[in-house]
Image (cartoon, rainbow, N blue to C red):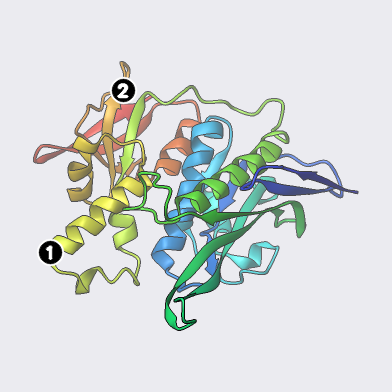
Amino acid sequence: MVILVFAGCRSGFSRTVHEPRQPFIVSSVVVYPVRLTGTRALGWREFELGQRLVDAGLAKYGGQLAFFGPSEFQVTKWQEVSWTASTVVPQVIRSGHKPDEAVVLRATAERRVASSAMERRDADDKAKGGIVTEEVTWVCELELLRPSTGEVLVNFAGQVAIDPFTPTGEEEFDPDAAMTHLLEKMGLAALKVAASALAEDAPEAKASPVTLAMSPAVTAAQPDTGLSSMDALAAEVWVQNRVRFLTPRLPEDQVSAAARMPLGLLVVEAQDGASVQPGDVIVRVDDQPPLPQVLARARLKGVPVQVTVKRGGAQVEALIP
């Protein structure tokens, strides 16, 4: 059975739900990098969009679902709806989760450009120049997959036009912010479906006692950034904009600090009970890489998570409940 639900706004999306072959349980979500078509495919940009989907999921469902992000594995066969499409299965197993309880978020965004020209003529019908305009539209598709059975559980499709004359405040670090937000909305709608299949006795972590900013070093490590060919000023601006994209709610006075840090998580705020403090940089999470989804997965175990932090010129061990 297929159910179609349509959203009516200009940047809305449709949803197609496929009846699963049998009931199932979901405990974890694997988020692929977002594949970009119709434009130059930049791996670092695809990674960042995938991480934004992870972060949107963590904010809503990080206390219930374990997330695996695009820097933790490689996608080798994009069109495959099975575990042979990526290298993530060992990571899922090492984290204590079952592959048959994992689903995948797979998104594609296609850039389409429509051009139009208007010629101007004078009173003698002679050409006086003209105006050429372009309208950019992003056509997005997002799927919720169950690789263990090869099923597509839900398919979302939508599109949004980029209006260059309506500033959003995000142009500097995300020229296609409307597309990013559309993907986030579709991702959250897909995760709502995934969360509906949680086991009745599924663990649930309390709200995180720390507010974190992600280092842009993960983005800078992608091979096609072109960072090495930039001059010092351009490189600094680029890195700061990556901070703004990865942590859009970060206070502006902390952007520079986050941009300068190595691979890690900057502690922006810490509540009572956490032995980290603002300004700390988490460089290891329970002997794993310092990623927000890694910390959220560890907290699902219901015990304090040991982290290694850089504080001043020293490294110290701390606990996050």
119 relative position to 311: left or right: right
Q: Looking at the picture, does residue 286 appear above or below residue 89?
A: above
Marks 1 and 2: CB-CB under 8 Å?
A: no
- Distance between mark 1 and mark 2 Cα atoms: 37 Å
The count of marks equals 2
Q: Position of residue 87 (x, y in %)?
A: 54, 64
Q: Position of residue 7 (x, y in %)?
A: 71, 42
9 relative position to 232: left or right: right
Residue at x 49%, y 68% (from the top left corner): 134
Could you tell me the amino acid type at mark 2? Answer: Ala
Q: Looking at the picture, does residue 186 appear above or below residue 71?
A: above
Could you tell me the amino acid type at mark 1? Answer: Ala
| Secondary structure under the numbered disc 2 in the rendered image | loop
Q: Looking at the picture, does residue 95 appear above or below residue 90?
A: above
Residue at x 21%, y 71% (from the top left corner): 228
Residue named by callout 2 = 274
250 relative position to 158: left or right: left
Residue named by callout 1 = 232
Q: Where is residue 204 in the image (x, y as percent from the top left)?
A: 57, 25
Residue nearer the viewer, 49 or 312: 49
Q: Residues within 10 Å of mark 2 (few under 14, many from 20)?
A: some
| Secondary structure under the numbered disc 1 in the rendered image | helix
Residue at x 72%, y 26% (from the top left corner): 200
Q: Which of marks 1 and 2 is nearer the N terminus?
A: 1
